Image: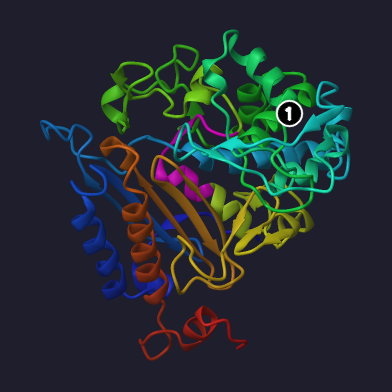
Amino acid sequence: MSTRLTYGQPAAAGLSPAGLATADKALQAAIGVVCPAAVLLVARRGVVACHRAYGWLDPETRSQPTRRDSLFDLASVTKLFATTAFMTLAEAGRVALEQPVADVLPAFRGPRPLAAYEDPLNPGVMIEVVPATSQVVEAGQVTFRQLLTHTAGLPAWKPLYKLPGGREAIYAAAAQAPFAYPPGQRVLYSDLGLILLSAAIERLAGEPLDAYLRRAVLKPLGLSETHYRPLSSAYPLRRRPSADIAPTELCAWRGRRLRGEVHDENAAAMDGVSGHAGLFATAWEVAVLGQLYLNGGEYAGRRLLAPATVAAMTSEQAVFADERRGLGWMLKSRQVSSAGRYFSPRSYGHTGFTGTSLWVDPQQELLVVLLTNRVYYGRSNAAEILALRQAVHDAASSCLTSRNGGHDDAAEAVSQGLEV
């Protein structure tokens, strides 16, 4: 039987109000410093014990308080939805994980040089590649599994939005991009891989990415507030006024403060629709996706993915240094993680550059959604949003209660990597 999210008291979820109050205090302190707006949702065993909004959607005038159903630019949390859509195609037999990407995207074939790539966090700064035995790789050997585990060897990012030609030009440039590393050599988180996955989904499904995502994932889950281009007239039944949407950065490229427009420049150049970024959503609907995976691929009586598929997606498929990857999902790092100290090693999640995140701990049956618009203040507060995420997740996990009302000793042992 699949668990459906419902509101309930902390005690019904085995959570202590004191621990949730610690998370609440951390977010209150962050408003106006780390981000102007935030929404937090904490659920355990399907019981939503905390769903709170913080700050302002108009921080200059403070006339529009953030609401629990405010929309946030998910940034890279979009990747979780796109990966889910791709895996529905894999389960339908239209594609296989071990299949070369070039089988679906013929342009992604042929020799590619290894080349320095631009640091996405410091545009203009080039990262030199580690010398390899061969300075040329064959793109045609890259598999879909490698795209999903970020082991394809593709560079982290390229400023594709500067190219004329929009969506098709970006797909073509991503397919012809030089590699940073030989495929399979290491984990390198890459937006280009998910841009290529977007093109593959469209080719396999025979329809635009947003249409297939809506049909295969969003509609079956009942997600009416998760979509691309929230201000677009293409979604008349779900169109939201800009006042309901958390603003992001004052964009130098577009010359305006962004509100209801995707923050990511490459996604914006693709008309706001891509698998690497572009979705806007509420905290509740992001939590539904997390609960789908906690349920083993089923939600509200609808099965999207087989339990074996979910198990594969959320278990370690690739590791390099402290980077652990499932299929589409980020797994908790052994050292520094935005999931904090107390989420178990089995935890999986994803973060978004705008300040969003979803973390799921299957061992504790816990999920936490934290949506913020930290880039409203610019891009230099990465350390601050990491510290906030860690504080919130530590508070949420540490408020698990045992029968005597204290901290769950099993959860504490798990946080230290011990078997219990």
Q: How is the image coloured?
A: rainbow
Residue under the point 66% across and 44% down: 129
Locate residue 324 relative to residue 32 in the image: left or right.
Answer: right
Which secondary structure lies at badge 1?
Answer: helix
Q: Which residues are magenta?
A: 276-288
List x then y, in percent, for residue 304.
70, 44
Please tell me in which quadrant of the rendered image residue 122 appears.
top left
The residue where tag 1 is placed is 201
Badge 1 density bin: few <14, some 14–19, many ≥20, Cα 10 Å: many
What amino acid is found at the position of numbered circle 1 in the picture?
Ile
Residue under the point 47% across and 63% down: 339
Please tell me in which quadrant of the rendered image residue 49 appears.
bottom left
- The reply to whether residue 158 is in sight is yes
Residue under the point 40% across and 40% down: 354
Residue under the point 55% across and 53% down: 290
Quarter the C terminus occupies: bottom right
* Residue toward you, 223 or 35: 35
Locate residue 188 relative to residue 20 in the image: left or right.
Answer: right
Q: Residue furthest bottom?
A: 404
